[in-house]
Image: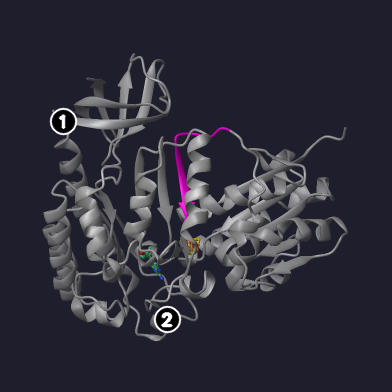
């Protein structure tokens, strides 16, 4: 029997790319590929890329340049670019970097086996279509391997919101929801393979409206169906848009026992002027009232968010409004980014903020967020949390898992296995994690 071919996939960007990379590895597994952790012994290298900010996209080209030596040594090595840079730049990638044999957009992953065969014949393969078929259904020839206790599951893809800064509506296309029965059968399959926690993914996950048995189902409806799956212990979802936080979803946060008390709800800015220019169609006030309602349903919910500083025409006063909003919400986690001009998006045409001022604002915002994060993490000391153990820690005898609030928690010298859910009393708060003892 011939040696299996080796596939090296490097994933950039969001969790959806992590999920997609797993699906690509499985589908190429059907063509005799096994995954390797190093590009040096690979027969095929795939970069699953992110186009969200300029830096993310540029990284791809510098990474590709590094494979020049490898390809010279091993002419049979095939190099592919997948993901949002592939979608946005298409053929341009092969022009700019002739090493590249294959370019595949996120909606065409199910065509990878044919594309791979084409590259083996010495041709270049390019596919950045938005086909009508359900690619995940076509990607289903997965081996039934055991899995770790947590998994991502894509339920919705694409976005119709067209925030003025964002490339996603162009790279991932229009909003599409997968039918509920397919998601449920995928979830059952994951649970059979050892998964205890599923994070439902979508660029606009709470806009989910997939076909159910009685018409369209909401995200809350889907969560309630998943709640019935035996062996599944925890449900999370990301990323949500404030405008799609429906009443049934807010209510589920108070009543659905497997739904974790954590919500990633990006607001981007605290200034109504900027929000309007971002085409966000909510205000700072409406966002704050929404959080009040969510906290009324689930008082201990951990809030998380995304912010952009230095959006075109942002003044110091606008930025102050962002700081005020952060002060009011107090996020357990938050991600803040300096605005990055994306060609083709409306904001790219607007007067840009001085990069020095933007850097300064980013630092101030991150300092405030870090302070809150720290205070919230420290406030866990003395509390009992429930931990899903995911892996061995760095030290001998140490086990690491996540609390319901997504804090990393480690315990030492405890009788606990990966995949177990146990109550832990938190005894200390470190730099990026909590320590505790089994109760
Ligand atoms: N510049 C900076 N940050 C951006 N994001 C999206 N587009 C841009 C951009 N052009 C951020 C938003 C979004 C997160 C995934 O990335 O905050 O919520
Ligand atoms: Fe990157 Fe956004 Fe594409 Fe995810 S959807 S890979 S974050 S550009």
Toward the viewer: 352 or 432? 432
Mark 1: which secondary structure?
Answer: loop
Q: Look at the image and tell me in which quarter the N terminus lies.
A: top right
Q: Which segment is the magenta one?
A: 146-154
Q: Which residue is drawn at 84% across and 49% down?
A: 76
Looking at the image, is 131 positioned above or below residue 112? below
Name the residue carrying label 1: 381
Asked whether mark 1 lies closer than 8 Å to ligand 1, one says: no
Asked whether mark 2 lies closer than 8 Å to ligand 1, one says: no
Question: Of the numbered discs in the image, which one, if any, rests on residue 348?
Answer: 2
Question: Of the numbered discs in the image, which one, if any, rests on residue 190?
Answer: none
Q: Distance between the residues labelled 2 and 1?
A: 45 Å
Residue 262 position, x and y percent, is 26, 49
Left or right, residue 187 beside residue 207: right
Q: Which residue is drawn at 40% across and 78% down?
A: 162
Crowding at label 1, few (<14), some or many (≥20) Cα neighbours within 10 Å? Answer: some
Looking at the image, is 10 positioned above or below residue 137? above
Crowding at label 2, few (<14), some or many (≥20) Cα neighbours within 10 Å? Answer: some
Mark 2: which secondary structure?
Answer: helix
Q: Residue at x 26, y 47 (%)?
A: 256
Quadrant assignment for ligand 1: bottom left
Looking at the image, is 297 positioned above or below residue 134? above
Toward the viewer: 193 or 9? 193
Residue 79 position, x and y percent, is 73, 55
Name the colour scheme. Answer: one colour
Q: Which residue is drawn at 36% across and 37% down?
A: 233
Whether residue 330 is visible: yes
Left or right, residue 327 beside residue 118: left
Residue 43 position, x and y percent, is 77, 45
Residue 276 position, x and y percent, is 26, 81
Give the number of marks: 2
| Pointer 2 or 1: first along the chain | 2
């Amino acid at each position: 029997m011939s040696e299996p071919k080796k596939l090296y996939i490097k994933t950039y960007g969001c969790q959806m790319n992590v999920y997609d990379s797993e699906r690509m590895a499985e589908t190429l597994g059907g063509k005799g590929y096994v995954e390797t952790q190093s590009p040096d012994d690979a027969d095929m290298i795939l970069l699953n890329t992110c186009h969200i900010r300029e830096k993310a996209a540029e990284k791809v080209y510098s990474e590709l340049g590094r494979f020049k030596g490898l390809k010279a040594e091993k002419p049979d090595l095939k190099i592919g670019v997948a993901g949002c840079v592939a979608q946005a730049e298409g053929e341009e990638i092969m022009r700019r970097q002739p090493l590249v044999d294959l370019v595949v957009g996120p909606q065409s992953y199910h065509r990878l086996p044919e594309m791979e065969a084409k590259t083996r014949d010495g041709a270049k393969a390019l596919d950045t279509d938005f086909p009508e078929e359900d690619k995940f259904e076509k990607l289903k020839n997965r081996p039934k391997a055991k899995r770790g206790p947590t998994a991502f599951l894509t339920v919705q893809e694409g976005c119709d919101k067209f925030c003025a800064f964002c490339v996603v509506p162009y790279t991932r296309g229009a909003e599409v929801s997968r039918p509920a029965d397919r998601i449920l059968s995928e979830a059952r399959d994951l649970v059979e393979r050892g998964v205890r926690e599923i994070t439902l993914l979508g660029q606009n996950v709470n806009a989910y409206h997939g076909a159910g048995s009685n018409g369209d189902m909401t995200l809350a409806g889907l969560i309630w169906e998943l709640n019935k799956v035996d062996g599944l212990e925890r449900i999370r979802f990301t990323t949500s848009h404030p405008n799609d936080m429906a009443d049934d979803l807010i209510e589920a946060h108070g009543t659905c026992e497997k739904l974790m008390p954590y919500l990633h709800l990006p607001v981007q800015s605290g200034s109504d002027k900027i929000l309007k220019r971002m085409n966000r169609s909510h205000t700072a006030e409406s966002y704050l009232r929404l959080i009040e309602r969510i906290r009324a349903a689930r008082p201990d919910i951990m809030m998380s968010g995304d912010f952009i500083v230095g959006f075109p025409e942002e003044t110091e006063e606008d930025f102050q409004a962002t700081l005020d909003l952060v002060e009011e919400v107090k996020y357990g986690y938050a991600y803040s980014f300096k605005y990055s001009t994306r060609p083709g998006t409306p904001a790219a045409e607007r007067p840009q903020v001085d990069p020095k001022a933007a850097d300064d604002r980013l630092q101030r915002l991150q300092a405030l967020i870090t302070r809150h994060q720290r205070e919230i993490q420290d406030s866990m000391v003395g509390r009992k949390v429930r931990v899903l153990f995911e892996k061995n820690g760095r030290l001998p005898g140490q086990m690491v898992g996540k609390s319901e609030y997504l804090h990393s928690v480690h315990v030492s010298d405890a009788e606990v296995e990966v995949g177990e859910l146990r109550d832990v009393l938190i005894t200390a708060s470190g730099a990026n994690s909590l320590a505790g003892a089994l109760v």
